[in-house]
């Protein structure tokens, strides 16, 4: 792994440790049941993997790592560095309705685009990722009802 890739992985690990150690915004996680914290932790871990994967693509392949793909796909995949990180921040800051909705939208589009790339564009490089992403999409869609805040006073949460 190139030095930049190791540095990105190290920074992501330090962020996750800092969150666990109790930065102010991690109180969102402490105020929930163990199962809800566990489920939200899966969201954070999976979207962190997305941030790391797409960041490494940029570091290893340059400013247009997906130039081989149709332009809308290239733009979408490139935007996932920011969108995946945004989901993490939104969830950890407690705006769960926004975070859960954005998670469902991102993963639905991601699975559809990657499945199209695997089947129609016949890019076998997606054969490993698509089933895992589809599994995570199922988890996201299946957990939204469990994680969705019930309070009338927390319109954004």
Image (cartoon, grey):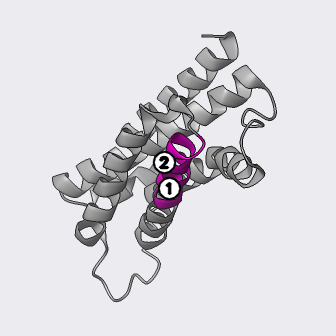
Q: Is residue 69 visible?
A: yes
Which numbered disc covers residue 115?
A: 2
**Mark 1 neighbour density, 10 Å: few (under 14) some (14–19) many (20 or more):** some
Figure check: 83 above or below 146: above
Q: Is residue 22 visible?
A: no
Residue at image coords 30%, 83%: 151
Residue 53 lies in the magenta stretch? no
Q: Is residue 106 left or right of residue 59?
A: left
> From this viewpoint, which residue is outermost toward the bottom?
152
Query: Horizontal and vertical percent for residue 21?
Result: 38, 37
Q: Nearer the viewer, residue 154 or 118?
A: 118
Residue with the mark numbered 1: 112
> From mark 2 to mark 1, how far is it between C-alphas?
5 Å
Residue at image coords 40%, 51%: 26
Give the total number of marks visible in the rendering. Answer: 2
Query: Horizontal and vertical percent for residue 86?
Result: 58, 54
Which numbered disc covers residue 45?
A: none
Tell me which segment is drawn in magenta.
108-121
Residue at image coords 54%, 50%: 116
> From this viewpoint, which residue is outermost toward the right?
63
Q: Is residue 14 left or right of residue 38?
A: right
- Determine whether label 2 and label 1 are within 8 Å by CB: yes
- Quarter holding the N terminus? top right
Element class at badge 1: helix
Figure check: 104 above or below 27: below
Q: Nearer the viewer, residue 77 or 21?
A: 77
Q: Nearer the viewer, residue 6 or 112?
A: 112
Query: Horizontal and vertical percent for residue 38?
Result: 24, 48
Element class at badge 2: helix
Q: Is residue 125 left or right of residue 46?
A: right
Q: Main secondary structure of the magenta part?
A: helix
Query: Horizontal and vertical percent for residue 128?
Result: 41, 31
């Amino acid at each position: 792994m190139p030095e930049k890739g190791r540095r990105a992985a190290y920074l992501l690990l330090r962020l996750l440790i800092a969150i666990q150690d109790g930065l102010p915004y991690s109180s969102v996680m402490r105020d929930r049941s163990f199962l809800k914290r566990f489920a939200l932790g899966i969201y954070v871990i999976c979207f962190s993997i997305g941030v790391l994967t797409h960041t490494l693509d940029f570091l290893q392949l340059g400013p247009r790592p997906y130039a081989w793909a149709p332009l809308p796909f290239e733009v979408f995949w490139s935007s996932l560095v920011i969108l995946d990180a945004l989901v993490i921040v939104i969830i950890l800051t407690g705006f769960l309705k926004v975070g859960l909705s954005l998670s469902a939208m991102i993963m639905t589009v991601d699975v559809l685009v990657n499945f199209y790339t695997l089947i129609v564009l016949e890019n076998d490089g997606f054969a490993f990722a698509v089933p895992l992403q589809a599994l995570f999409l199922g988890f996201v869609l299946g957990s939204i009802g469990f994680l969705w805040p019930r309070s009338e006073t927390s319109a954004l949460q």
